[in-house]
Amino acid sequence: MESWIEFGRGSLFRFAFVLMILGLGRLVVLTVAGLWEVWRDMPDRRLPWADIRRNTAGWLFPVGRLWRRRPVYSTVSFAFHVGLLVVPLTLAAHLLLWKRTVGAAWPAIPQPLANWLTVLAIATGAALFVMRAAHAPTRALSRAQDMLWPLLLIVPFSTGFLCSNAVLSPPAYRTLMLLHIYAGDLILLLIPFTKIAHCVLAPFSQLVGAMSWKLAPGAGDRVAATLGYAEQPTWIAGSRVAGSGARKEA
Amino acid sequence: MPLVEITPANQKQEDGPPPSFEPGRGLPLASPADKEQAFANSKKPEVLERQHLPVRFHVEDHAVADRPRRFLEAFAAILKHSNYRLALEHYIRVSAKCSRCAVECQVYMATGEKRDIPCYRSELLLSVYRRHFTISGVLRARLFGDPGLTDEKIQEMADAFYNCTACRRCTMECPVGIDHGLITHLGRYILSEIGIVPRALAVSVREQLAGATGNTSAVPVPALLDSLEFLSDDMQEQTGVEIPFPIDQKGAEYLFLAPVSDFLMEADTLMGIAAVFRATGDPWTIGTGYFDAINYGLFYNDQILEKVVRKIQAEAERLEVRKLLIGECGHASRTAKYFYATFCGGEHALPAVNILEYTHAAWKSGRLKLKPGTIAERVTYHDPCNLARPGWIVEQPRELLRAFCSDFVEMTPNGREGICCGGGGGTVSIDEVKPFRMLVGGRAKADQIRATGAKYCVAPCANCKKQLRELVEAHGIDCQIVGLHDLLYKAIQFEDQPRSPRGELD
């Protein structure tokens, strides 16, 4: 088991971490390239920059917005995010790992604070799952990943908390540590391929929305021509009855 | 049609108003009977059989066979030539499905049903994109045998995207920034390319782009001129001042375009606007070549959106004007302000101004004098989504109203967070969905208006006005829906005016 643990926090961790970085980097590059493509051809480059800045910052640090709608759910979600971000990056025990992997370290938060933040993450993660399951509209919307993510994220926090604070037999400790490490690695591996990619993409959302309303001049005519309707625009009666359109390239 | 009973809350409060009014706390969901009436389908069985489309709005006959393939072809063509892929790619990656948007939607407020959650509605289209236009979607379909887009899903989208008014209120509360209004717009655009578009909208656009009159209400130029001459005479009689409607004045500062129905049905609004220009003396003109600000392209088709904007461009160039001035209309103003530059010269295109901005600026500069306290009855203000949601026109009309109304009260929420009238996105023009607009889409707004106890509700938008008039009648609310310039006309003071404007609002 020791070798599995060492593999999990050694090679596998480095692989998962690098894959996450590359995966998220790819998404950022694709998004920036998409924005550039639209920007390049935009005849009117005026954008509501003040709104874009305010809403982007407002949702990255949503303290002032939490109470407006679904306050309990929103506050719990925010607290969950705080725990998720702070503990893995600043726990003293993790800093060794970070130093070994990325070659750098930074000050650790005090252990008691780390413990409280861990409890906060576990409690809010469980609450998010319960609220998602119990709130009919949210449950109806949820995909499998929406239900599973809070549970998966709780695993490394709860196992890590037990390993740090509980009196455990060596086999129990090793089992929990194995679970802790492999759950952490799995999370890193999944991040770029699931909705958790919003950790790097959300800051682009307001800009993406604003630029998407900058329609492409002449696009409507080109669409009609591509569909074979250049001479039969949508506003002509009977233009979309059977037999119309030739589905040809413009 | 008895829709709701008048409740005590509808009675005017005699003790003076609190500063603002919230819609009834915990506004109950529409009753099952109301929902049944709202979602009832009045189509003839043979039409349903022929069109395979159980939506409540009427649609002209179109090719039904192989509809999923044709939908996907239209989707692919739009992706190829437009900018929508940027948003779709982004939204399928970040969508968190938190349902925070649900509490924002006036339709969901009334039905409480999954299908009316903005995120659920958007997912209908996002899932098609993910399945058919991404590598992972295609691979997953191969692995798990997903058959892909079905005709049933197209039917569901046709229904869902016309239950949404694209008011974009939900967008303001989406933590990951999904613009559901954009998705509704795109969904409707694709549907229109395969022939699924409300007949009411299609017929209006046909007249506008291919008809003899060239406008959505088929108003011939002689009728327009007669109407304006009559209004001019009426104003002279009321005020003692000559207040003209300049026609085809080359080189004027402003080309005025109103939602064309205003020229027939909103005499008070037009008189107020003309009176403002009489007071400021700025050169403006109405063009007989083109005078309709309505652009239903914004609601369902980008090709139409551009064609209509180019009609405005042609008239502006013919008359050599320097600015576009749009009357009291939300979607028309948004179209001119945000899309004229896109299609007609970029940042150097003519600027578009909404009449509320113009009037406000004239009043602020002292060129327009308003008599304080002219309107003593309680007045409230409805924010048209297309004006207020981007934060463009929020305070200007309020400052104007406070200048001449002694009892102005707000609805809550208002401004950028204002609730849609329930007739946005072109749905107000679809008569057959009126029960839906009254019992579901407009339910929250009716509650807001009732709670104010206002005598007048100012709604500076042709679509909002029509919806709200029907709404107050259906809900038995004693409130008159008017344009801002309808009331302002009564308060204008001309320097050479022998007497004040009179005339009761109809």
Image: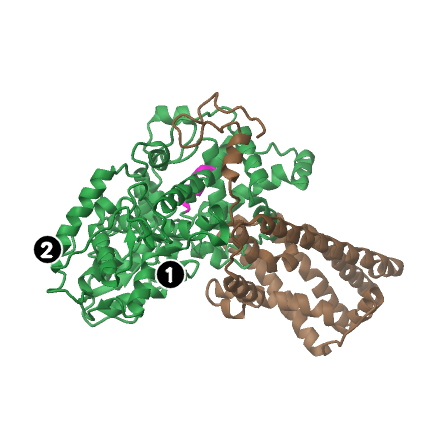
Chain colours: A brown, B green
Q: Which residue is drawn at 11% across and 64% down?
A: B499
Query: For mark 2, what is the residue?
Result: B237
Mark 1 or mark 2: name the one nearer the start of the chain.
Answer: 2
Where, quadrant-wise, is the N terminus of chain B in this rendering?
top left
Residue B431 lies in quadrant: top left
Query: Label 2 is placed on what type of residue?
Result: Glu
Query: Label 1 is placed on what type of residue?
Result: Ile
Query: For mark 1, what is the residue?
Result: B393
In three-dimensional space, the C-alpha distance between marks 1 and 2, rounded to whole angstroms, equals 33 Å
Write the start and end of the magenta stretch as one range.
B156-164
Residue A168 lies in quadrant: bottom right
Q: Nearer the viewer, mark 1 or mark 2?
A: 2
Residue farthest right in this picture: A3
For residue B268, side relative to residue A230 (left or right): left
Query: Does the segment drawn in magenta span residue B165?
Result: no
Q: Nearer the viewer, residue A5 or A210?
A: A210
